[in-house]
Image (cartoon, grey):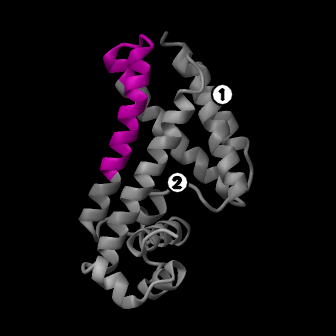
């Protein structure tokens, strides 16, 4: 069994991913983590906001792994983005369409109110764009185009993943993958 602190972070991450920042309470996190409220506040004296930052960090790390694995799924980044969208579909379907982006739901409820959380989410998105940028650059896409394409890829995946969740359908991600693939191929 993971250590108490790790269980608390996992529970916070999962609950905030599904319910958002405002929809998730400290008591619920402690129950889900099988930890006392005292333990939660011991490890996270900053309370819910500190937990949200840890949850975003965890979600960021998890998606970095998914992103890298998907983009490594084919030597051609145009085909690799299709592999990535298929992986996202499989993950969403396995969660019964509830576990989308590990950061967006948490961050959206805090925009304009909690700048530290907003900043952590922005840093995660920048990191993800950087991974896509590096992969495109390695494949011969020019620096300026790779930067713009990386923005397009991450933004499109975010929207398609949300649309897939809402519609409980793989179609939005499949279509996004096909069109991103064509777009990336046009730059090579």
Dominant secondary-structure state across the stretch colored magenta: helix
Does the stretch in magenta take in 153? no
Give me the disc on residue 178: 1
Instruction: Determine the secondary structure under disc 2.
Output: loop
Report the residue at 62% width, 27% height from top: 179
Q: Residue at x 60, y 45 (%)?
A: 160
Residue 165 location (% of width, % of height): 66, 56
> Alpha-carbon distance for marks 2 and 1?
20 Å
Kindly state the secondary structure of the residue where label 1 is placed. helix
Q: Residue 78: horizontal and vertical position, in percent?
A: 57, 20
Residue at position x 47%, y 79% in the image = 24
Foreground of the two, 9 or 146:
9
Q: Is residue 11 above or below residue 31?
A: above
Of 7 and 78, the residue lying toward us: 7
Is residue 162 shown left or right of residue 142?
right
**Taking 19 as reference, is 109 left or right?**
left
The crowd level at tag 2 (other Cα within 10 Å; few <14, some 14-19, many 20+) is many
Q: Earlier in the sequence, mark 2 or mark 1?
A: 2
Position of residue 112 relative to residue 31, above or below, is: above
Q: Which residues are magenta?
A: 122-146
Residue at (45% x, 88% y) in the render: 27
Q: Position of residue 167 (x, y in %)?
A: 72, 55
Q: Closest to the observer: 102 or 4? A: 4
Residue where numbered disc 2 is placed: 101
Residue 145 lies within the magenta run: yes
Which is more foreground, mark 2 or mark 1? Answer: 2
Q: Residues within 10 Å of mark 1 (few under 14, many from 20)?
A: some
Kindly check if marks 2 and 1 are in contact, taking CB atoms under 8 A apart as contact.
Answer: no
Q: Is residue 188 above or below residue 168?
A: above
Residue 110, relative to residue 180: is it above or below? below
């Amino acid at each position: 069994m993971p250590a108490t602190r790790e269980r608390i972070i996992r529970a916070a991450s999962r609950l905030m991913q599904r319910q958002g920042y405002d929809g998730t309470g400290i008591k619920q996190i402690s129950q889900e983590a099988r930890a006392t409220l005292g333990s939660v506040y011991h490890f996270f004296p900053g309370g819910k906001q500190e937990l949200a930052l840890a949850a975003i960090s965890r979600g960021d790390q998890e998606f970095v792994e998914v992103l890298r694995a998907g983009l490594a799924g084919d030597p051609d980044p145009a085909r690799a983005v299709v592999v990535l969208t298929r992986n996202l579909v499989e993950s969403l379907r396995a969660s019964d369409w509830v576990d989308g982006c590990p950061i967006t739901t948490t961050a959206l409820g805090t925009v304009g109110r909690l700048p530290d959380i907003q900043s952590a989410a922005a840093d995660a998105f920048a990191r993800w764009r950087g991974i896509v940028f590096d992969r495109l650059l390695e494949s011969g896409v020019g620096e300026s185009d790779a930067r713009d394409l990386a923005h397009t890829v991450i933004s499109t995946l975010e929207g398609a993943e949300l649309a897939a969740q809402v519609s409980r359908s793989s179609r939005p991600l499949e279509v996004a993958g096909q069109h991103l693939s064509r777009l990336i191929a046009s730059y090579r």
